[in-house]
Amino acid sequence: MSTLAPSTYLAPFSVTEDSVCSEEKLLSLLNDLPTALQTGNRQLHTLHALVLVARVHVEAVRGSFAELQSCEQATAEQLEEFKRELQELAGEWGDKKLLESKLTVSERQQLEEMSGLLHSALSTENEDLTLFQEVIEQLFAGMEEQKVILSTNWLREDHQENSREKTESYLDQILAIRSEEPANSSRMPTLSEAEIFQDAKDIKRDELLINGVKVEGTRGYDAVVDALQHELEHVLARQVGKTPEQTPMAVSNALQSVAMAVLHSSNRTESGGCSYELLSKFLSNHEMHRVILRPDSARAAPLEVHMDVGPYLEAVPGSKEPTWAFGLRVKLVAVTWYLVCDAEDPTNELYEVETTFCNRLAFPVGLTPFHSLDIMRKDRGDVAVRLVVPTPDPTPAQE
């Protein structure tokens, strides 16, 4: 008798087209699972931070009015724990140092000493630039990652504050942030026609990387602003589980102003201007023109704009104590290259210098309690300077 199975019989583990298709779908879902879990985990952390920020503000309001105080109110220890959690979740956005608008005495002294060594080496008493080259190479060799960090606060005069530091209540802080005084740096500035014209002129010669997506500046000012606003809306919508089309009109209008402010803060006039001014102040004393700086435009990298949503510290006008906020966070990075040349012979290129301008903007866009839509955080920014020492030509013996 035949032992062959009937033609209609299917072994338990036999493979059909449908089962293969199902397995492929399952494998595809499993491959996507880590990414989905990571995304979900990030969203949970971000929502937790939003809850903590809201709790900090609500508890501060309760503490400001006797009528609102109750036994359910958080203790001082609990509030400190909330803030410690926020500090951890915020990362660099919780660094108070980034909010400072002036250098400390020791920071200014250190920069003056380093630049003073270079300026002395450029003295006319030295016949050539050999001493300058020795000093600058030794200086950068002794720095971490061979980089010198120059704060844009160095460009500001060191004015001593005569007024004593005030201890302000929470209500005073909120009123200071929402103040409509022209000097209030917490409000989003209205760009003038001249500033918009300059931004439009600058962006035509440049390109942006908006969360990794390249946007050509040749598309024009309006198109670039639209691209920035589009990504801002998507970043915000993804976090709250909605579509960009569901963004309220008031928030959408605010995001257009945010996009314009981001473009204005990242353009070459501001980012490149700060880099050039700081590098020029660091290298030359402007009394003896022994070296000159020449931009290496051919090596200009795209302007990088990194956007996300999360908690951040916010400066309070007139107070040294910041407060916590939650909203859109934007990090700007602009890399510009310069050539350090002999002033007597500009074709003699001594060094290549890479400058990386970095700054941060943040906007609560209605996500932080008691904050209007036009409030913003803008840091002073800093520039990382990296010196590229030329490789010596090989000697005939080495060849």
Image (cartoon, rainbow, N blue to C red):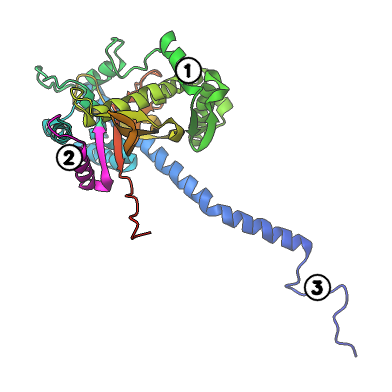
Q: Can you tell which of label 1 and label 3 is closer to the viewer?
A: 1
- Horizontally, is 204 left or right of 81 in the view? right
128 in magenta: yes
Asked where in the image residue 268 lies, by quadrant, the reply is top left
320 in magenta: no
- Residue for badge 2: 131
Q: Secondary structure at mark 3?
A: loop
Q: Secondary structure at mark 1?
A: helix
Q: Can you tell which of label 2 and label 1 is closer to the viewer?
A: 2
Tell me residue 245's x, y (percent). 58, 26
Task: Give the Cα distance between marks 2 and 1.
Answer: 41 Å
Q: Nearer the viewer, residue 238 or 307?
A: 307
Task: Give the Cα distance between marks 1 and 3.
Answer: 72 Å
- Circle 1 packing at 10 Å, graded few (<14), some (14-19), many (20+), is some
Tell me residue 350's x, y (percent). 30, 38
Q: Amino acid at mark 3?
A: Leu
- In magenta, the rendered stretch is 124-150
In terms of sequence position, does the residue under pointer 2 or pointer 1 come before the other? 2
- Residue for badge 1: 201
In terms of sequence position, does the residue under pointer 2 or pointer 3 come before the other? 3
Task: Give the Cα distance between marks 2 and 3.
Answer: 87 Å
Image quarter where the N terminus lies is: bottom right
Which residue is at a point 32% across and 49% down the rendered structure image? 392
Q: Nearer the viewer, residue 351 or 32?
A: 351
Tell me residue 319's x, y (percent). 19, 22
Q: Amino acid at mark 1?
A: Lys
- Residue for badge 3: 10
